[in-house]
């Protein structure tokens, strides 16, 4: 898989296709990227005779019905084993399109063109594809890498501030997993007034951190679990908010999850306070507070217990003994988890 950074997608796509012999090219977008992003490619799409498939936007569409409709359209429009699918969109499009490609005729090539910050630094890279099923997120899926990922940070200028902040939580996570210099640079950014040039540079660094980890452990047998930092608590916050009819963006839940998991890290592993407090301050200022009460604790503990990354009934956390000092499969008891909730609430 190659990651290509560009501000000019069309020649980059042409370069990707130069030595390839695809019989047909399909492009999957959603109702939002169809309007805001596809126009950048419309001449190329027409000239190349690319067939555009458009799905509904949003996580609600990341399901078996949408997937089935993509398979159906690929079949009806004559896709073969030698066809290519280009996924143009955020994480839902790259995950679902990647899975459609991974399964169609036992697998066809696909290229991801992520259009959100979250998909640039996380979803589009690393080969996880899939859909939600039976009320569970990403329950059905496969590991299959895009042949190329084309990253054009110009798309970031089309995003609202909340979506910038959401993707940035995954970048902060990568910085915490990497080193103190990268972490410090991330804490300097003012996301209310993004410096897009600095952001583009940090996006590249972030993707490189993820690529290195995935390169060592593509199927999440060991090191890749590091990428779950902030996510065990984060998924619980996301599920609670969703069940209460007030969904929160994934990255916000991850940021609050990072606060709780760094709290566990400081108690259990001595994560230094000189790194703990500035991180917590940055997250509070950028992401605000997650509103919940102690009446929600049992429900949150339940979500944490049922996280699909747990093995043999044990809740596994990725924690840090320091920035870049990753500790996998750590355990915390109920009291300590509740203390972390208290810490997050009390501010
Ligand atoms: N989003 C975490 C991973 O790709 O493993």
Image: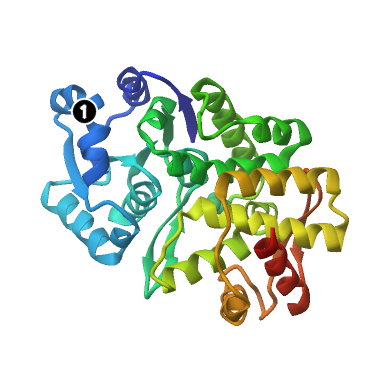
Q: Residues within 10 Å of mark 1 (few under 14, many from 20)?
A: few
Residue 30 showing in the rendered view: no
Q: Secondary structure at mark 1?
A: helix
Respond yes or no on whether mark 1 lies under 8 Å from ligand 1.
Answer: no
Residue 55 showing in the rendered view: yes
Q: Is residue 331 above or below residue 18?
A: below
Residue at x 22% of width, y 54% of height:
70
228 sits to left or right of 16: right
Number of marks in the rendered image:
1
In the foreground, 47 or 174: 174
287 sits to left or right of 75: right
Of the 4 image quadrants, the one containing the C terminus is bottom right
In the foreground, 285 or 247: 285
Q: Position of residue 117 (x, y in %)?
A: 46, 38
* Residue at the extreme left of the image, as rendered: 76
Residue at image mark 1: 39
Q: Position of residue 91 (x, y in %)?
A: 40, 48
Residue at x 42% of width, y 37% of height:
147
Q: Is residue 8 above or below residue 129?
A: above
In the foreground, 24 or 241: 241
Residue at x 61% of width, y 31% of height:
189
Q: Is residue 143 above or below residue 292?
A: above
Q: Position of residue 293 (x, y in %)?
A: 59, 74
Q: Position of residue 278 (x, y in %)?
A: 75, 43
Residue at x 66% of width, y 43% of height:
282
In the foreground, 20 or 204: 204
């Amino acid at each position: 898989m190659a990651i290509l950074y560009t501000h000019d997608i069309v020649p980059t796509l042409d370069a990707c296709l130069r030595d390839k012999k695809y019989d047909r090219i399909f492009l999957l977008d959603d109702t939002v990227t169809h309007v805001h992003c596809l126009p950048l490619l419309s001449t190329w799409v027409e000239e190349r005779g690319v067939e555009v498939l458009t799905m509904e936007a949003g996580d609600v569409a990341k399901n078996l019905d949408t997937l089935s409709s993509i398979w159906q359209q690929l079949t009806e429009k004559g896709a073969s084993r030698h066809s290519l699918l280009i996924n143009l969109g955020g994480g839902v499009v790259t995950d679902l399109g990647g899975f459609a490609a991974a399964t169609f005729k036992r697998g066809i090539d696909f290229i991801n063109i992520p259009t959100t910050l979250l998909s640039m630094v996380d979803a589009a890279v690393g080969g996880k594809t899939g859909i939600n099923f039976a009320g569970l997120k990403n329950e059905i899926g496969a590991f299959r890498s895009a042949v190329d990922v084309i990253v054009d940070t110009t798309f970031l200028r089309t995003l609202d501030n909340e979506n910038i902040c959401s993707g940035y939580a995954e970048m902060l996570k990568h910085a915490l997993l990497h080193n103190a210099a990268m972490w410090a640079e991330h804490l300097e950014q003012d996301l209310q007034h993004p410096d897009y040039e600095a952001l583009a540079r940090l996006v590249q660094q972030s993707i490189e951190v993820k690529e290195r980890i995935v390169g060592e452990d593509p199927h999440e047998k060991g090191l890749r679990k590091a990428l779950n930092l902030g996510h065990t608590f984060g998924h619980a916050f996301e599920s609670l908010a969703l069940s209460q009819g007030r969904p929160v963006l994934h990255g916000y839940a991850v940021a609050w999850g990072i606060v709780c998991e760094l709290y566990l890290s400081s108690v259990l592993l001595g994560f230094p306070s000189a790194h703990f407090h500035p991180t917590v301050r940055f997250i509070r200022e950028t992401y605000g507070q997650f509103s919940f009460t102690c009446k929600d604790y049992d429900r949150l503990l339940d979500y944490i217990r049922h996280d699909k990354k747990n093995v043999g009934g044990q809740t596994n956390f990725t924690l840090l003994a320091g920035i870049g000092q990753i500790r996998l499969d750590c355990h915390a008891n109920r009291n300590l988890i509740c203390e972390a909730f208290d810490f997050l609430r009390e501010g």
